[in-house]
Image: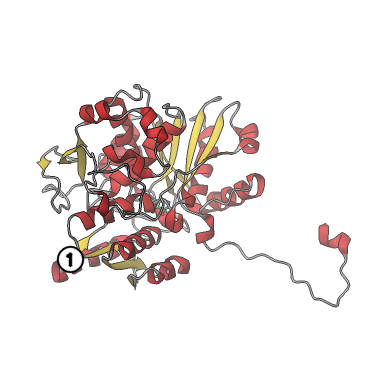
Amino acid sequence: MTDIEWTGGALPTFVTHLECGLTGERYQADVVQGLSKAGRPLLVRYDLAAAAKVLTKDMLAARPQTLWRYRELLPVRRPENVVSLGEIVTPLVPLPRIARGLAKGGEILVKDEGRLPTGSFKARGLVMAVSMAKELGIATMAMPTNGNAGAAMAAYCARAGIAAYVFCPDDTPDVNVREIAMQGARVFLVDGLIDDCGRLVAEGEKAVGWFNCSTLREPYRIEGKKTMGLELAEQLGWEVPDVIFYPTGGGTGLIGMWKAFAELEEMGWIGRKRPRMVAVQAAGCAPMVKAWEDGAEHAPRWEDAHTFAAGIRVPVAVGDFLILRAVRESGGFAIAVDDSAIAEAWSEVARTEGLLLCPEGAATFAAYRQAVAEGRVGPGERAVLFNCASGLKYPMPPAGTPLKLGNAVNWQQLIG
Ligand SMILES: *Cc1c(COP(=O)(O)O)cnc(C)c1O
């Protein structure tokens, strides 16, 4: 028995090879791979024409509603290696009250990824990376994280029987550190940023031979994140939205969605239209915004990175050129919002729409608001904002008025 409902038999995946995202050089699939010789991410390639012959939209619609319904477009070959915790379809939650005031006939849809296992969309990437690790016989994995990725890796490693080592900055939210430990991983608090943690993971890789699962250093997290693009198109009736706001750290999701849209077009499932891809960053850590404004292909490390939106505090990204390429090819842009705008957006959406975002998700709304004000999003456009984690995973502002039993309650004052 596997964790997922299967229609029987070996997995009909259509992987042909891996390819360097920078040089296009080919690499073999089905063996352990890290970065390409050029030191850049490897992308998984498929025989999409063959996949399009066996898979139909109706077949997809009839399958159980988990991300494994896209299995022909995913890398895992054997069902027994699928390590699932129930990767459900996440809802598109409209923000009608806010849209009425802001969108001028347009639509704001929040893709609420906080509903996934471990409470963040890191589950999409890590369920794929860990399933592939199991398939390839990897026994020990390590990663640097700002919290959510480590939690997802810990959970899936626990389920797969793989040992997990996780390195976080020492100011990572407590709840993340503790959930990582609860899920059986060894967790280390480093007095630095995520790229400092990444250096430790790379050193440990040389010293003790664990598998380095850093963002984009292994080829399969992108494939998991790609399902956001597949799912979004499917949910919108095989249409893409006009514009997507994505809180960008390492950029896996943005790169993954861009790849998804290309694959869907190659299969003839969507047309040529693409959403404008908007990379949202915090003003205190905006390497992609700077590179986009400078017209550069790569983004140098951002010094003194700071923002309370921990998931996007990523000073340097190995997939920088893939993020920038997707943003440019799509006609989108990169935009920075400061922490006060993020905090205001966080409370506004919760207060007026009842949707508690994570701070990174709130950053996308702050960016949307700014983009509308600057005329970068037009009247009548359909925008999708990514909320990548449950708001419940983050420290919230203190609240609660004390009430002493035995004292008379002034009810008028209480409701005032
Ligand atoms: C990791 C993370 C991000 C950034 O995602 P990338 O695909 O790495 O750019 C954004 N928000 C949250 C909540 C995250 O955990």
Rendered image quadrant of residue 372? top right
Q: Position of residue 15 (x, y in %)?
A: 19, 39
The three-letter amino acid code for the residue at tag 1 is Glu
In the image, 213: left or right of 257? Answer: left
- Position in image of residue 395 (x %, y %): 54, 63
Visible residue check, residue 331:
no
Q: Secondary structure at mark 1?
A: helix
Q: Nearer the viewer, residue 183 or 107?
A: 183
The N terminus - image quarter: bottom left
The residue identified by callout 1 is 205
Q: Residue at x 59, y 50 (%)?
A: 344
Q: Nearer the viewer, residue 114 or 5?
A: 5
Q: Quadrant of the C terminus?
A: bottom right
Q: In the drawing, does residue 18 fall left or right of residue 183?
A: left
Label 1 environment density (alpha carbons within 10 Å; few <14, some 14–19, many ≥20): some
Above or below, comparing residue 112 to residue 118 in the picture: above
The number of discs equals 1
